[in-house]
Amino acid sequence: MIDLSGRVAVVTGASRGIGRAIAARLAAQGAFVVAAARERNAASTVDEIAAAGGKAELASLDVGDAAAVEAVVAATLARHGRIDILVNNAGIAKDQLLLRMKREDWDAVITTNLTAAFALTQAVLKPMIRQKSGRIICISSVVGQTGNAGQANYAASKAGLIGFAKAVAQEVASRNITVNVVAPGLIDTDMTRPVTEDARAEWVARIPLKRLGTPDDIAAAVCFLASHEASYITGQVLAVNGGMYM
């Protein structure tokens, strides 16, 4: 069984869906979780973790605000003395065909999905280097590997995370810090549930395992990469997509 006791984990986008499942799973394995999201949106995640016997605290964070990122990292270090795990999960989508895409929608997606990962990773590297240990995990997407019409901004941001993680992994490997990527496929979340039954059936038909993934499927992969069991894995993309892209 994975044991993350004594580890401090920061999870962005922890208010719902994949981020919430990751936060809950890390806490269940013994980590102290800093659940970060806009305003106080992750409060229910912290309550859920506490009710299950885990340990967590809330961090109000707009990942697009560089000063706020620095403040959350500094506050976490002041309270706990270390950061062992960073999960760059926060993300948004603003879909549109490229000919109709507004520049502000391109900028918003790149800022939230990619630039925020740069800022957070940069902020945690110094304490991780001092500790001579750390786990950084970026949540990409199958779309970052395959592309998808109407999602040029989203695909670019998620593909960018893969290149980013591979580059940083090479920079910090000698300090016992690993940097990896989890690339989810089609996951059953609040974002996908409103689709029609016909659309859902079409999606499932494209997946060899014949089901959508769950947030827990992604959380399990993250927990593995955050654990000692994955200490010899870095710069890799773990695709959790039911075989949708091989």
Image (cartoon, rainbow, N blue to C red):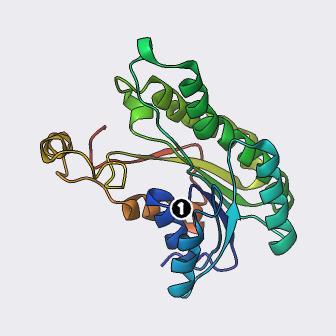
| Left-right relation of 227 to 220 | right
Q: Is residue 6 above or below residue 53?
A: above
Q: Residue 112 versus residue 146: which sits nearer the camera?
A: 112
What percent of the width, then of the height, locates residue 200? 19, 46
What percent of the width, then of the height, locates residue 173? 71, 47
Q: Residue at x 83, y 64 (%)?
A: 75
Q: Which residue is mark 1?
A: 15
Q: Name the outermost residue toward the top.
A: 99
Please indicate, yes or no, whether residue 204 appears anywhere in the rendered image.
yes
The C terminus is located in which quarter?
top left
Q: Residue 116 versus residue 178: which sits nearer the camera?
A: 116
Q: Is residue 17 above or below residue 29?
A: above
Q: Amino acid at mark 1?
A: Ser
Q: Residue at x 55, y 88 (%)?
A: 53
Please indicate, yes or no, whether residue 163 appears anywhere in the rendered image.
no
Q: Residue at x 60, y 67 (%)?
A: 228
What percent of the width, then of the height, locates residue 135? 65, 57
What element does badge 1 sit on? loop
| Left-right relation of 72 to 9 | right
Q: Residues within 10 Å of mark 1 (few under 14, many from 20)?
A: many
Dividing the picture into quadrants, the one containing residue 231 is bottom right
